[in-house]
Amino acid sequence: MSKVVSRGVSAASGMLGGVIAGAIFKQVWKFASGKDDAPQANSEEYGWGEVLLASAIQGAIFGVVKAAIDRSTARSIHRATGK
């Protein structure tokens, strides 16, 4: 039963992490570029440099947020279950 609960909590925290990371990225991109929306990879109005920079920033933010939430969730589950 503990594995089922753990997986459910991990899935929920992963979704929450995606929302949080998306919000952080939007604010970082707005600050860095002065634009509200990040360039889409398939948009012709942006150059390679801007698209790749946006993707690199987004990936870094998602990676850090995911690691922080996964670590926090694992520690919380460990404290609650002792496993």
Image (tube, rainbow, N blue to C red):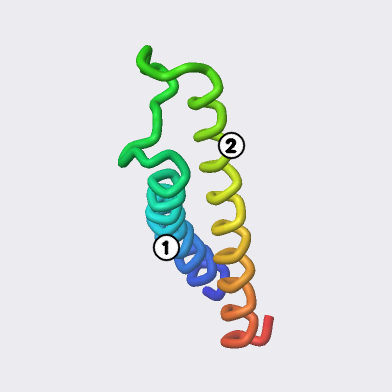
For label 2, count other residues whose C-alpha is less than 10 Å away and answer few (under 14), some (14-19) or many (20+).
few
Q: Which mark is residue 12?
A: 1
Quarter of the figure that contains the C terminus: bottom right
Q: Which mark is residue 46?
A: none
Q: Residue 77 sits in which quadrant?
A: bottom right
- The amino acid sitting under disc 2 is Ala
Q: Residue at x 46, y 50 (%)?
A: 28
What kind of element bears circle 2? helix
Give the spatial CA distance, label 1 vs label 2: 25 Å
Q: Residue at x 58, y 80 (%)?
A: 76
Q: Residue 20 sits in which quadrant?
A: bottom left
Q: Residue at x 51, y 64 (%)?
A: 10
Figure check: 30 above or below 10:
above
Q: In the orientation shown, which residue stands out farthest toward the right?
A: 83
- The amino acid sitting under disc 1 is Ala
Q: In the depicted view, which residue is nearer to us: 46 or 68?
A: 46
Q: Residue at x 64, y 81 (%)?
A: 78
Q: In the orientation shown, which residue stands out farthest toward the left?
A: 36
Could you say where residue 61 lies in the image, as x and y percent from the top left? 55, 51
Q: In the orientation shown, which residue stands out farthest toward the top?
A: 44
Q: In the orientation shown, which residue stands out farthest toward the front?
A: 34
What kind of element bears circle 1? helix
Could you say where residue 43 lies in the image, as x and y percent from the top left? 36, 17
Q: Residue 23 sits in which quadrant?
A: bottom left
Q: Which mark is residue 56?
A: 2
Q: Earlier in the sequence, mark 1 or mark 2?
A: 1
54 lies left or right of 36: right
Figure check: 11 above or below 33:
below
Could you say where residue 4 lies in the image, as x and y percent from the top left? 50, 67
